[in-house]
Amino acid sequence: MTGWIVHYEVASVVILTALLIQFLYEKRIKTKTTSAFLLMLILALATGVSDLLSVYMINHSQEFSRSINYFVNIVYLISLNMLVATYFVYFLFLLRGNDKLRRHDKFFIVLPILYYVTMIATTPYTKLIFFFDEEGRYLHGFLFNSLYFIAASYACGVVVMAMRRRFALTTSQAVALIFYTTSEMVCLVIQYFFPNYLLNNFGVSVGILLLYLSMQNSMGDSDKQMGTFNSEALNKKVDYSIRKGREFYLIAVQMSGFESINNTFGTNRGNRLIRQIAEYLMMVVPKAMVFHMTGLQFCCYVEKEQEGVENLVKKIEDFFQKKFQIDESKTEIMISCMIAVAGYPQSHSTNAEEMIELLNFALKEPGIAAADHVVWVDEEVLKRCDRKAIVESAVNRALLQNSLEVYYQPIYSTEKKRITCAEALLRLNDTEYGMISPDEFIPVAEKNGMIMQIGNYVFDSVCKFTKENKLWEYGIEYIEVNLSPVECMQVNLHERILAVMSEYGVDRRYINLEITETAAVGSNELINANMDALILAGLSFSLDDYGTGFSNTTKLIELPFKIIKLDKSILWLAMKDQQAMSVLRHTVSMLTELYREIVVEGVETKEQVVILSELGCNYLQGFYFSKPIPGGEFLQYLNTYKNNLV
C-alpha cells in the first residue's frame, strides 16, 4: 500500500510540537488532569512522528530491514491506541475533579490496552494486525479493524459519561470535549474508507489544541504580572493535596502601607516593589510554590515538617525587617506585614476555600494578630473561626425566620424632665445558641453583606411600631435608628427610607438617623447627598459614639448633624479624673456654641444626671433610666414613668 497523503500528518506534528514546548515552558499546577494531558501530547506527537517514519520506510522498504519496519509501525499503532485510552482517562479526571480511578474504570481501560498491546506487539509472528508481504508491501491483518472498534468504544464511553454528568461540565469544557470526540470519530471514519489519507492524527491535534486553549492553558494558573501562580491555581493545588491526603502548610503574607508608597512615589514603583517581594518568596519557597492572592497578599504552599516551615517563616519575617530601596535615588522605606500559617490536616479544612478563609480570618480578625506579626492557626483560632460561622448561621436563620428583635432604650430630656425619645437597638436571641451580642453579630453581618437586610428589617420594624402604637401620644418625639457605614454608602438610601415611612404613614419628624463617628469621618459625596435629601424631607441626624474615633471637629461643621451623642467612655472617665472632666466640660461648651443638641450615653447614677444637667447636656441615656427593653415593655415603661424620673 503506497501513495499516502501525508500533508495533514505533517501539520499535526508541527501543531503538537509547538503545543508541547509551550506546555512544558509555562508555570502550571501539576494534577492528574494536567499529567494526563501531557501524556496525550507526547503520545499524539509520537503517533505523528512514527506514522510519518512508517510511511517513509514503507515507500523505501528496500533501504530498511523488515524488523525496523515492524518496530516503527508497532510504535505507531501502540501510541495511537494508547492516545485514545489516555483521552478517556483525561476525561475521567476532568469530570471527577482529579479523583482516583474506580475499579470498573480500570477494567474498562486496562483490558483493551492488554488486548491491543499484545496483538500489536506479536503481529510480526501472528500477522493478525498488519504484515509485510514478500514484496515488502504493508497490508492489514485479520484483526486490524478491531483497533477501530476499541477506539470507537472509548469515544462512546466519553459521550455516555458526558451525557450522564453533563451538569459537572462548563460550557467551554463541553464544547472542547464534543469537538475533540467528534473530530476523532470523523477522521477515523474517513481514514477507514480512505486509508491513503492520514487524517486521524490531524483531527486529534486540532482537538488537543482546543482542549489546551479552553482548559489546560496555564494563563489560568499564572499571574503574569508577578511571575507567580494565581489564586485559582492555589485552589487547585490545595484541593488536590487534600484529596490526596498530603500534609502541607499554607503561609499567607499580607503587606500593608502601600497606599502611602503609591501616593508618594507612584503606582509603578509600588508595583515594582511588590514584584521584588514576589521574587524573594519564589527564591526561598520550595519549588517556587508562591501564589498571588490579591494586590498585597501572597500565599506560599509548603510540604515540610513544622520545624522547616518555622525556619521559612523566620526567613520571610527577617526579610521584611530590612529597608527596601524604592527608586534610583536610593530612598529606603520599611514595609510591614502580617503572616498567618495554617497546616493540613491540623486545620480540619475539607477544601481550599475553607483553608484560605481560615488564613484570612487569622490575618484580619481583631484581637488575633500576634505582637510579632506571625499567627499560627491553632485550636484557639479555630474556635474563634467556628464561632464566627455560628454567628453567621444564627443571623441567616434569624433573617429567614424573621426572629430578630428590636429593643428600645429610653432617652431622658433634661429640659422637659421626662422621656422624650428612645434608641432602637437590635437583639439576636438564637433558638440554638442563645443571646448573641450586637458587638459580635453586627461586624459579621457587615463583612458578609447581610447588614443591608438587617438594616431594612430594623427600620421597617421601627416605623411599624411607631405607627401602630402612636408613640407621639406617649410623649415620644422621635426614635433614633442606627445606620451602618455600608447603608450610608447606598445610592438609593434616601429613597428606601422615605418609601418605608410613606408605606406606614409615619411623620418624618418621628425618625432620627444615627451615623457613627467613624463613618462620618470617612464620609464622601454619597453620604452627604443622602443626608441632604433626608434632612430636606424632614428627618434629622445624630453623630453617634463621638469621642471614640478621631473627634473630627471639621465634620461637625461640614455635616448637618442636629444631635451629637457623647460616648459613655467619656463620661465614665470624667467621673474619675479631673482632666477628663475638664475635657467633657469643654466639649459640651463647644457643641452648645455650635448649636448642636447633646446626648450623653452611659448614665448610671443620679450624681451623673445632676452633673450632666448642670453642664447643659440636653439628653441622657443609660441604665439609670432603663436598659434596652422589648417594644411591649417599652410601652409599659412609658405608662409607668411618664412623669419626672429624677
Image: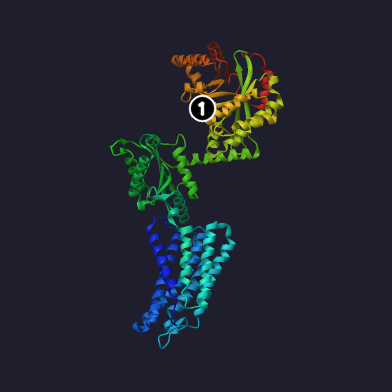
Q: Is 277 in front, or is 122?
A: 277
Q: Is residue 145 left or right of residue 469?
A: left
State the residue lying farthest toward the bottom: 134
Disc 1 residue type? Ala
Determine if residue 602 is in view.
no
Q: Label 1: state its secondary structure.
A: helix
Q: Residue at point 54% right, 24% down?
A: 544
Determine if residue 42 is in view.
yes
- Residue 299: percent from left, percent from top: 41, 46
Q: Which picture quadrant has residue 256?
A: top left
Q: Which picture quadrant has residue 461?
A: top right
Q: Is residue 502 left or right of residue 380?
A: right
Which colour assignment does the render follow?
Answer: rainbow
State the residue lying farthest toward the top: 614
Rendered-image quadrant of the C terminus: top right
Q: Residue at point 49% right, 39% down?
A: 384
- Residue 469: percent from left, percent from top: 71, 25
Q: How many marks?
A: 1
Rendered-image quadrant of the N terminus: bottom left
Residue under numbered circle 1: 520
Q: Is residue 336 above or below residue 482?
A: below
Q: Is 407 in front, or is 220?
A: 220
- Residue 312: percent from left, percent from top: 34, 46
Q: Is residue 9 above or below residue 596?
A: below
- Residue 344: percent from left, percent from top: 44, 49
